[in-house]
Amino acid sequence: MAPWNFDEEIPWKDAGGLSARAGRAAPMGVAQLLREIKNSFQSRFSGVLIEGEIAQLSRSQAGHLYVLVKDRREDASISCVLFRQAIARLQFAPKQGDVVQISGSMSVFAQRGQMNLIVESMQLAGEGTLYAEFLRLKARLQAEGLFDEAVKRPVPRYPSRIGVVTSPEAAALHDVVRTIRSAAPFMPITRYSASVQGDMALTELIAAIERANREKRVDVLLVVRGGGSIGDLWTYNLEPLARAIRASAIPIVTGVGHESDLTIADLVADVRAATPTAAASFVTQYWAAAPDLIAQCEQALTRAMHSQLGGSAMRLDAADRLHWIFSRHLSSLEARLARCGNMPREFAHYVKVLGSDLQTRTGDLERSAAEFLRARSLRLERLDAALESRVPQPERHREKLDSLENRLSRSAIQSVRERDQQLQSLGKRLKGVSVEGTLARGYAIAQDETGAVMREAAGYAPGAAMTVRLARGSLKGRVTQVLEDSA
């Protein structure tokens, strides 16, 4: 619809016999006249489009916007009202001197007899054509599938380097860098300079994206700029830039203008953020939360190690109690052997069996300890691998985990060494009370010609053959004299 020039002569339509009534003797009421005019306006001018310059602006306490728009060529003006719904649809902040196109409907405010244009939409003059072009390109690219979620690349949760495509003088660049440094101070940032508006903007933006893909230095690319009018942002609505974004192998996050601004670049990007700052926050959100996640993992690992070490301590306490029981038993055996002198064959066999059982139990304990340590080591390796797979950690956190693992390893090795020393001591003591150990201390075993141990002198006569078993070798002889025990 062409803009309406309110300076033209407008032919009046007879609204309900208004002209006929004017000739009557009975006058009309003011309210009735205004109602007739309002009804006529609403039926005749329900969808007008005008163009003019904003001469005055004011905002009511209720939040409505009153705008006086004047003709740019002649001395004429009209009052316009924007209610909250129309204000919310504005794509720019109107100011005095702006040349605008307004669509709406005429109405009459009866209390003041004032004619107003109720605004449905308002945009800067010239932007209507651009917006129509935006809608045409959007529909065509959408039909090609360039906006489909299936073709969009996933943005890495923990990027190792971030690229930024924007003007080096743009305030958006400083906002992005500040936001990234706040969330991830260690993060390297690569800037790909390009104009964000003007004749060279399209060429430079495409070249920056292609350069980033050739160099392959960054994991994600931010294409950002600050706010502006639809004309200022128009480069981001051009088809060549949209296709360059879609062709990029590097995931692209856009942050163009403000939240109310929407461009073709936003629609084709892998992720659209409302502002440059929001784009920077999006790509660093997991790095910002990483310290808390690492702390939680450290606490979980520490609890797991304490639990496992507690179980190990209980097993070692049980081994200590077993050692104490065997020590007492061996001490009792030594005392009995010292009193008995010569050890009977049956008792020697019992001690041998006991020693064999002790060695078996000792071996089982050693194997159990070794298996326990291997299981704990495998468990720690799995926990460490799980932690590495879930949270890429900076080096200082890995050093803490290595320190904890070294402490556990040293503690386990020391415990095994102590148990080994105790087992060696038990072995030496067991060897001391064996038949060979008793003979080595100077004792001897006397056997008759049948091999039976000679226990009482009264059972043998002079001349009886006998064998005396020593620690090394044996002696053959005969009884020369039988001496009775004087006791």
Image (spheres, rainbow, N blue to C red):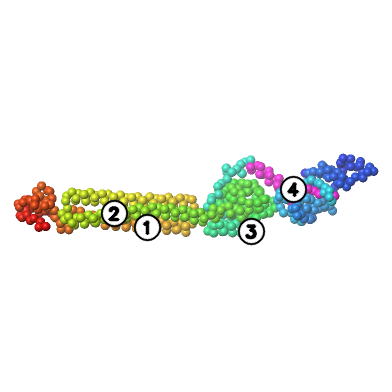
For the N terminus, the image quarter is: top right
Give the residue at mark 4: 121
Q: Which residues are magenta?
A: 113-142
Q: SS of the residue at dot 1?
A: helix
Q: Given the image, on which type of amino acid does mark 4 rest?
A: Ser
**Location of mark 3 (residue):** 171
Q: CA distance from mark 3 to mark 4?
A: 30 Å
The mark nearer the N terminus, 4 or 1, is 4
Which secondary structure lies at badge 2? Answer: helix
Q: Is residue 135 magenta?
A: yes
The residue under the point 59% across, 54% down is: 280
Amino acid at the residue labelled 2: Ile
Viewport quadrant of the C terminus = bottom left
Classify residue 306 as left or right of residue 139: left
Which residue is depicted at the point 82% across and 42% down?
Answer: 43
Spatial CA distance of label 1 from label 3 is 57 Å
Q: Earlier in the sequence, mark 1 or mark 3?
A: 3
Q: Residue at x 82, y 51 (%)?
A: 78
Residue 46 in which image quadrant: top right
In the displayed orientation, state which residue is furthest to the right.
25
In this rendering, the count of numbered labels is 4
> In front: mark 4 or mark 1?
1
Is there a contact, CB below 8 Å, between mark 1 and mark 2?
no
Q: Which mark is residue 411?
A: 1
Residue 287 located left or right of residue 465: right
Pointer 2: what residue? 325
